[in-house]
Image (spheres, coloured by chain):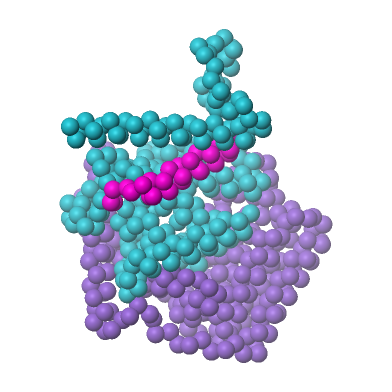
Amino acid sequence: MMLAPAAASAAAIGLASRRAQARTEESRAPMLGIMGAFVFAAQMVNFPVGAGTTGHLLGAALMAITLGPSAAMVVMTAILIIQALIFQDGGVLALGANVFNMAVAGVGAAWLPYRLLGGGRMRDAGVFLAGFLSVLVTAALALGELAASGTAVPRPLAVLSLGLFSVNGLLEGLITLGVVKALGRMNAAWVARPERLNSRTAAVLLGSAVALATAGLLAASAAPDTLESLAQQMGIADRGRPLFETPFSDYAAAFIRGRWLSQAAAGLFGTALAFLLIYVAAKVRSRRKGA
Amino acid sequence: MHHLELDDWSRKDSFLHRRDARAKILGLICFLLSVALTPNCAAPYLWVFGAVPLAALLVARIPLARAFVLSAAVLPFAAVFGLASLAAGGHLRAIAVAEKSFLSALGAVALIATTPLPKLTQGFLWLGAPKFLVLVIQFLYRYLYVISEQAQHMRLAAASRGSRLGSRFRMYRLRAASGALAVLFSKSYLRAEAIHHSMLSRLFSGRFGLMDAASPTLPDYTTLVLLVLINLLLNRFIVLISQCRL
């Protein structure tokens, strides 16, 4: 189980490193190293989480926003390697999985909302979501890898873990937003807004969203969700009748056989529909502004 | 500052210190694979693998107690996964997770304690690690404690001004922490720029003047072959006596 994420991490970091090198002058590598040292040091600044506990910044979102995604992936990887080899933090055996979860997926999950929202009026939401998602995606992947390695985490424990990580994610989002705002006041160039999306980038981002949605649906639990479970317990689950049936009811395409395939098709349809609605709304809004 | 301790150890002289970094890195990878690929049901016998890093530390004359303490730093992290395994009803798995984590950390300490960082990074480069990543690692390691000490000074200054962790005004604390981080970021960035400019003025081209790696010698090859054989044999031996399979 440790080999698959290690191989994926090696490939992803090889690409990110090449990309970062192409975009950054080689002689500026020292700066990235020192910014990595900053993330180390930043993790020493604690803030209250509640119930007498404190948390600290993870830094994936902050790095992605200030250095760009490729450089941030390289810096996070360097941090994780130093932590595993010198400080035995996280362990050498888990290094591949940690790099994949935090440096590749964590930074990617932070960059996606910032790239989509950071250039416009919803910049603050983009920064907050970057911090929130970087923690949540990392945590969800860690739990998923644990399950894939054969440890069936009991449902209450998994729910509790995700709840705690959500609180951590909220705080990461808030503190990332606070730091980015403060940096903007000090030197706006440090937190430059991302350029407006061109059609190719938008297509890549859309593709990523579709892939994530599909993967999420494929990995989704077959167990009923909280509301369904409550309805079953109260004995009212079967009383409700839909007003009309659609070919995608219950998150599955009725015209495709096979549970996974039909759920994936429903996921793709839902994502495409959501994108279409947002696109139309954005077009209408921009026309109104233009007029 | 245990990285200074590791630095000091890595500059000692012993049979293992003189070995080529590439042989030691490949030996560690072989050790990690052997440990990781041993089935969890063999947990009661996994400790036998400890003989490999233990022998390396003894040959390199590294203080064992300190090496064990440094390696134990991985245990809190392993405990989280161990507890999850325990909750899922796999007590052997929980023990195996803790053992494997500790053994891998001990192996890493044995490598770091016998190989100075420049040689280690040169070994990583030879194994195909991206050059840019290796450069970032070298600078990160070099300035880690400079920036960390700056953070500690800022914490001390904040504490002297009456900042308390238990403040009832959480949002205020959160805002204050954000501000402190932004100041630390700006100080780090400015320091990074100053270092960058001073390196450019000394004609730094982006490459470290690493010495060309000498060709591995017969003792290097012998050490590597021995490490591979011992690890494979230990893996087979443990699987055999525990009578369990992957």
Report which colour depicts chain A.
cyan
Q: Does the magenta stretch include residue A202?
A: yes
User: Which residue is more in the foreground, B224 or A206?
Assistant: A206
Is B228 above or below relative to A107? below
Q: Where is residue A189 in the image (x, y as percent from the top left)?
A: 21, 57
Q: Residue at x 66, y 60 (%)?
A: B36
Report which colour depicts chain B.
purple
Q: Residue at x 35, y 54 (%)?
A: A64
Residue A198 as seen in the image, left or right of residue A291 = right
Q: Position of residue B30 (x, y in %)?
A: 65, 70
User: Which residue is more in the foreground, B203 or A159?
Assistant: B203
User: Which residue is more in the foreground, B8 or A214?
Assistant: A214
Q: Which residue is drawn at 53% across and 78% down?
A: B126
Quadrant occupied by the C terminus of chain A:
top left
Residue B43 visible: yes
Magenta residues: mostly which secondary structure?
helix
- Write the start and end of the magenta stretch as one range: A194-221
Q: Residue at x 59, y 69 (%)?
A: B107
